[in-house]
Image: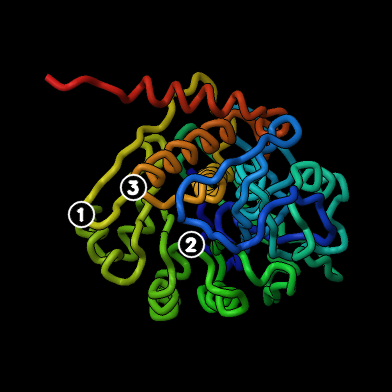
């Protein structure tokens, strides 16, 4: 669902760096009374924005992407794991970003994120250039060929969590060095839910550090290739047992055009990919999935098996919209009623009666 690059990134396929500024954050209750104690109502904000009660923080990247697919080509558009994740999550709840960008990062991209009510207090702007990625997809859209990676200010990024963000209800650690992911976790009061992503570069190069991180993570979200590399086994069921034994309570495996698998204890939940007539660019789809998944859980305040399953479907919905256009263009005009309609279509597509 998202690209992979074999070069050392501080962020992954769709992961990048951030920017400074402060977005308008919807008013929400504090931590008292707490997440996980039953349903919490979510009131609609302006068109397309749901004001959730869960304070969701993402560590990731905001970048400039240049992408070519058989269906078109774009240059230096908004990209990065934090950009995709936060935009998708903003349809469900309040979301804040920890990341870094260079002095050349276009203000119009920050304006878009602010318009989504994404809090940019934790995005730093540093001297130097913004992280850039250039890649190309063939008709086999599951994985990109990386043509160029310029880490720039992201190479020396050491995430700092502002005091205002040190008590999140939920935390998503997008793909960077697992030691840096753990460093952010150590800077915050233990969240109600912690999820993370990683990639083969860290699985192969910092395996011990990654497993130390997993002891403190509730949900791991990775693709099938990463799962097999992490579990050192081609069988995903066997892999799930090993990974769940390492710490996470839930394992979500993204399988591109084949959908998603979720393992929780001895239960397995599978969702197909939504059949689309047109797919233009899969860049960032995995991060949009994670944003939809975490955003929905933050909005409801539930962590039951049923809630997790609905969250997987909402994540799949957001990913399906993301691939319909380059960068975040499809999500720019998306309305919440579109999300609900596609959620309903997912349900109709998968429901069946017993004999």
* Residue at which label 3 appears: 305
Give coordinates of residue 132: x percent, y percent. 71, 56
Residue 174 appearing in the image: no
Give coordinates of residue 183: x percent, y percent. 58, 79
Q: Nearer the viewer, mark 1 or mark 3?
A: 3
On the image, which quarter does residue 329 sit in? top right
| Labels 1 and 3: the sequence-earlier one | 1
Marks 1/3: CA–CA distance: 12 Å
Q: Is residue 352 left or right of residue 153?
A: left
Q: Report the residue at 45% width, 43% height from top.
A: 311
Q: Is residue 108 left or right of residue 291?
A: right
Marks 3/2: CA–CA distance: 14 Å
Instruction: Tell me whether the residue at label 1 lies in contact with that at label 2, contact meaning CB atoms closer than 8 angstroms.
Output: no
Q: Is residue 208 above or below residue 150?
A: below
Give coordinates of residue 251: x percent, y percent. 35, 56
Q: Which mark is residue 266?
A: 1
Q: Report the residue at 76% width, 63% height from top.
A: 123
Q: Report the residue at 86% width, 50% height from top.
A: 106
Q: Is residue 47 above or below residue 309?
A: above
Label 2: how many Cα within 10 Å (few below 14, some 14–19, many 20+): many
On the image, which quarter does residue 104 sit in? bottom right
Q: Which mark is residue 193?
A: 2
Instruction: Tell me whether the residue at label 3 lies in contact with that at label 2, contact meaning CB atoms closer than 8 angstroms.
Output: no
| Labels 3 and 2: the sequence-earlier one | 2
């Amino acid at each position: 669902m998202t690209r992979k690059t074999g070069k050392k990134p501080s962020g992954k396929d769709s992961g990048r760096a951030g920017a400074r500024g402060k977005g308008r954050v919807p008013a929400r209750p504090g931590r008292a009374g707490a997440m996980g104690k039953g349903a919490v109502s979510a009131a609609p904000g302006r068109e397309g924005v749901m004001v959730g009660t869960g304070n969701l923080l993402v560590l990731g990247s905001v970048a400039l992407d240049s992408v070519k697919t058989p269906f078109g080509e774009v240059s230096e558009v908004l990209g990065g794991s934090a950009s995709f994740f936060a935009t998708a999550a903003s349809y469900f709840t309040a979301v804040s970003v920890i990341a870094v960008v260079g002095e050349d990062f276009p203000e119009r991209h920050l304006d878009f994120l602010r318009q989504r009510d994404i809090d940019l207090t934790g995005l730093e702007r540093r001297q130097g250039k913004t992280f850039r990625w250039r890649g190309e997809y063939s008709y086999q859209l599951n994985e990109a060929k990386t043509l160029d990676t310029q880490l720039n200010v992201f190479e020396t990024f050491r995430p700092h969590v502002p005091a205002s963000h040190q008590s999140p209800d939920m935390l998503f650690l997008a793909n960077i060095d697992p030691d840096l992911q753990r460093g952010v976790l150590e800077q915050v009061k233990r969240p109600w839910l912690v999820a993370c992503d990683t990639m083969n570069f860290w699985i192969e190069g910092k395996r011990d550090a990654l497993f130390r991180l997993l002891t403190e993570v509730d949900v791991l979200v990775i693709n099938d290739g990463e799962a097999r590399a992490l579990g050192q086994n081609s069988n995903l069921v066997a892999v799930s047992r090993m990974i769940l034994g390492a710490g996470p309570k839930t394992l979500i495996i993204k399988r591109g055009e084949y959908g998603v698998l979720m393992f929780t204890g001895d239960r397995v939940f599978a969702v197909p990919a939504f059949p689309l007539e047109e797919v233009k660019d899969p860049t960032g789809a995995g991060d949009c999935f994670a944003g939809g998944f975490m955003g929905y859980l933050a909005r409801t305040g539930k962590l039951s098996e049923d809630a997790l399953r609905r969250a997987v479907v909402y994540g799949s919905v957001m990913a399906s919209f993301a691939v319909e256009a380059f960068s975040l263009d499809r999500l720019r005009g998306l309305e919440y009623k579109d999300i609900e309609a596609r959620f309903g279509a997912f349900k109709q597509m998968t429901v069946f009666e017993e004999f």
